[in-house]
Image (cartoon, rainbow, N blue to C red):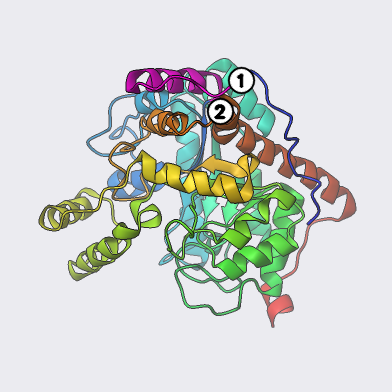
Amino acid sequence: MSDAFAPDVTDVTDVTDVTDVTDEAGLLAKAHELLAAHPVVDGHNDLPWALREQVRYDIDQRDIAADQSAHLHTDIPRLRAGGVGAQFWSVYVRTDLTGDDAVSACLEQIDVVGQLIDRYPSDLRRALTADDMETARAEGRIASLMGAEGGHSINNSLATLRAFHELGVRYMTLTHNDNIAWADSATDEPRVGGLTAFGEEVVREMNRVGMLADLSHVSADTMRAALRVTEAPVIFSHSSCRAVCDHVRNIPDDVLALLPANGGVAMATFVPKFILPAAIEWTQRADENMRAQGLHHLDTTAAGMKVQRAYEADHPRPAATAATVADHLDHMREVAGIDHLGIGGDYDGTAFTPSDLADVAGYPNLVAELLRRRWSDADLAKLTWQNAVRVLRAGEDAARGLRRLRGPSNATIEQLDG
């Protein structure tokens, strides 16, 4: 696509130069100060699925106004402590749910996000637009947006895609861990070579309605195909870079290099197996142990975590840290540029987290590490807040233009893919 949605690199406000603070306490204090002005927009948090798995959406049992650290990575006090100003809540559906079951499960996820927003109105604010995000920040509330994780949730229906957008979903991850009929996943055997004709139509319809295409989880060929087709910026809601950790879930440098022309943003994740090379093999063995116990390898219920912790006790886990994440961000900044970076922790969607980014209260530790590496206040403001808000606004602008040019697509997968 053209560079119509590339950022204005001069648009930096209320920031200062590189800090000269060097002591740990001073760096952390400076991090909190920066986050008070430019809070974190986190691209991906799986709290809704954790509520489904743990308590079947009974939020009385998981009152996130109180400390839930015994059960979850996320609650409101820790979001506040972490300097989070906006959260894309993942309305995720596991790939063993298919067809109408996947659609229903996604609707349930959307519903529980609404329940949380209604229950905690002094802390959470529904956000559908970039302006809503800025309003929430001005009010001192956490902007709550939604992203659907896995294109199987639309059951090959563009009308369902549009319905999800009407319900507030503002991005869709094209695949999860398995291929779908119209797109290849990073963690499955290539089948269609990226996107089919229907997959391209899905991206175009997302552009038209104003739903960002999320390229986390998809194969590198799917990334390239989506970037070729899209008429709006894309995001990677929770992915890091393959050059630093050679995992198929990460972004190759040639794809990162396409982001400046596209105007999109890559939001670095904290999942140890995606950021620390030594953690890849360890996690594969831990996953095999989970399956041997008759559990899904992504199971983070109490029963699943008991098995994981027992395995970890017998097989010490390689520890990722905020410095590990910072290594990825340093490289991503070098290849894509500071205007195309963000943060997507994947909290409550992973069994393990970095030692000093254990939960949503940990973001100041990452900011402090980046300050230690001489990142400027201006760069940090873009990383935490400005880039994500800009990309959502650019997606809205693109959609307004496209809706003047064409109406809703009623194409079917049978028509386009045969």
Report the residue marked by disc 2.
376
Nearer to the camera, 165 or 260: 260
Location of residue 79 with respect to 407 vertically, above or below: above
Report the residue marked by disc 1.
15
Tell me where the magenta segment starts and ends, as one range.
15-38
The answer to whether mark 2 and mark 1 are in CB contact below 8 A is yes
Which residue is located at x 67 percent, y 32 percent?
A: 130
Q: Amino acid at mark 1?
A: Val
Location of residue 72 with respect to 350 vertically, above or below: above
Q: Is residue 67 left or right of residue 407?
A: left
Crowd around label 1: few <14 · some 14–19 · many ≥20 (10 Å) = some
Question: Where is residue 82 shown, x and y percent of the image?
Answer: 40, 27
Question: Where is residue 244 shown, x and y percent of the image?
Answer: 45, 56
| Count of numbered tags | 2
Q: Is residue 371 left or right of residue 73?
A: right
Which residue is located at x 22 percent, y 55 percent?
A: 304
Q: Image quadrant of residue 406?
A: bottom right
Question: Extreme right residue here?
Answer: 405
Please indicate, yes or no, whether residue 299 appears anywhere in the rendered image. yes
Q: Amino acid at mark 2?
A: Ser
